């Protein structure tokens, strides 16, 4: 809870939520040095995207269609930043990133992913809509 308070999250929101740490105990995946296979079948992989907050992760999904999507959370705010390997503006980075250099290294990992992986930043609604014109996860 004190970590949540430090990062401006309202603790009551998570009062009934169980937050268990995930060990990245699996092999490297694409540009990420380690992973965690949630179901053991490669469909949901947790990968490290440090810098924004301590322990920040992304989730690489392989959909039934075979399409791969990486949910990047707040590691990056826009698909443009991924495409252009852009770090956050200095003032924004100072306000929201725990480690600015590490956050930029995460952006570079996203930028270097192969073209068949769609990176979805949590706050880029335009990119999310463009990625799924037929609806969620299609």
Image: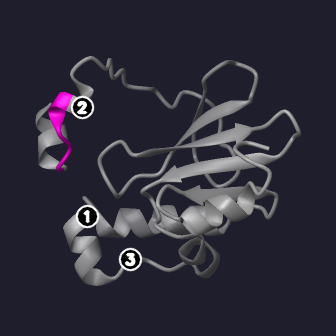
Q: In this view, does 42 lie to the left or right of 14?
A: right
- Badge 2: few (under 14), some or many (20 or more) residues near its Cα, within 10 Å? few
Q: Mark 3 — residue?
A: 88
For this orientation, the residue located farthest to the front is: 134
Kind of element beneath mark 3: loop
Q: Mark 2 — residue?
A: 13
In the picture, residue 36 is in which quadrant?
A: top right
**Is residue 95 depicted above or below 26 in this figure?**
below
In percent of width and height, residue 123 lies at 47, 61
The reply to whether dot 1 and dot 3 touch (C-beta < 8 Å) is yes
- Badge 3: few (under 14), some or many (20 or more) residues near its Cα, within 10 Å? many
Q: What stretch is highlighted in magenta?
A: 8-12
The reply to whether dot 3 and dot 2 touch (C-beta < 8 Å) is no
Q: Which residue does the image show at 17% across and 50% down from the upper left?
A: 8
Principal secondary structure, stretch drawn in magenta: loop
Q: Which of marks 3 and 2 is nearer the N terminus?
A: 2
- For residue 96, the mark is 1
Q: Earlier in the sequence, mark 1 or mark 3?
A: 3
In three-dimensional space, the C-alpha distance between marks 3 and 2, rounded to whole angstroms, equals 27 Å
């Amino acid at each position: 809870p004190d970590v949540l308070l430090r990062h401006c999250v309202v603790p009551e929101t998570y009062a009934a939520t169980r937050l268990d740490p995930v060990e990245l105990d699996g092999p490297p995946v694409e540009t990420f040095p380690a992973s965690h296979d949630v179901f053991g079948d490669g469909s949901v992989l947790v990968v490290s995207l440090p810098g924004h907050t301590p322990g920040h992760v992304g989730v690489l999904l392989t959909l039934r269609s075979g399409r791969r999507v990486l949910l990047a959370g707040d590691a990056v705010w826009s698909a443009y930043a991924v495409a252009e390997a852009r770090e956050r503006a200095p003032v924004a980075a100072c306000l929201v990133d725990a480690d600015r250099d590490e956050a930029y290294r995460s952006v570079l990992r996203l930028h270097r992913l192969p073209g068949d992986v769609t990176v979805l930043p949590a706050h880029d609604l335009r990119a999310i809509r463009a990625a799924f014109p037929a609806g969620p996860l299609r």
